[in-house]
Image: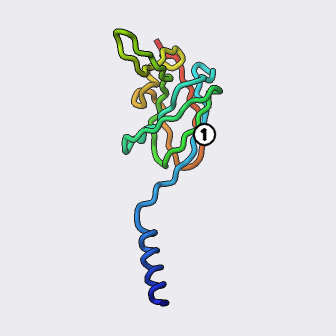
Amino acid sequence: MRATILTCLIVLSAVCGCGESEPPKFDISGTVSFTGKPIANGTVTFEDSATGVAETFSIQKDGTYVATVPEGNYGVSVQPPLVTIADTATTQGGDEIKKVDYIPNRYWSSFESGLSVSVSADSTFDIHMVKAKK
């Protein structure tokens, strides 16, 4: 009987101990602003520069966001909100980017935004967008 219980415990511990564990995740929070004023909607995307994996998080009405991502280095971008366009007699509706003047186009891409963050603990990352220089 003891041998059976001991065998079961060994097998159970081997099964539970196998497999890859997920890397730790950390909370990144902050405010998104344009020319010093918080923006009220849109999304913030964190793109892992090593894997290309991206995760998107909503901007709240007060301009804040909270993201939970694994440790790593991220390119950051900000996108306008999507709006749903209804079908018409001649065109099919769908989601499209809302036209806004408070998120300049260069911030839509993590490659062009100039925004990046290294994540290794819970932290704050405020995003301050500015008008393009002419």
Mark 1 element type: strand
**Farthest top residue?**
90
Camera-side residue: 73 or 99?
Answer: 99
x, y (%) of residue 54? 42, 38
x, y (%) of residue 9? 47, 79
**Farthest left residue?**
90
x, y (%) of residue 19? 40, 63
Question: In the displayed structure, does residue 33 sit left or right of residue 132?
Answer: right
- In the image, what residue occupies the spot 54% across and 17% down? 102
x, y (%) of residue 76? 47, 33
Task: Look at mark 1 in the image and give the residue it sits on.
Answer: 124
Q: Give the quadrant of residue 86.
A: top left
Question: In the displayed structure, does residue 129 sit left or right of residue 94?
Answer: right
The coloring applied to the image is rainbow
Q: Amino acid at mark 1?
A: Thr
Camera-side residue: 63 or 3?
Answer: 3
- Above or below residue 28? Residue 99 is above
- In the image, what residue occupies the spot 41% across and 61% down? 20
Camera-side residue: 35 or 38?
Answer: 38
- In the image, what residue occupies the spot 42% across and 31% down? 110
**Farthest front residue?**
89
- Above or below residue 101? Residue 111 is below
- Total marks placed: 1
- Above or below residue 72? Residue 106 is above
- In the image, what residue occupies the spot 62% across and 31% down? 64
Question: In the displayed structure, does residue 96 sit left or right of residue 61?
Answer: left
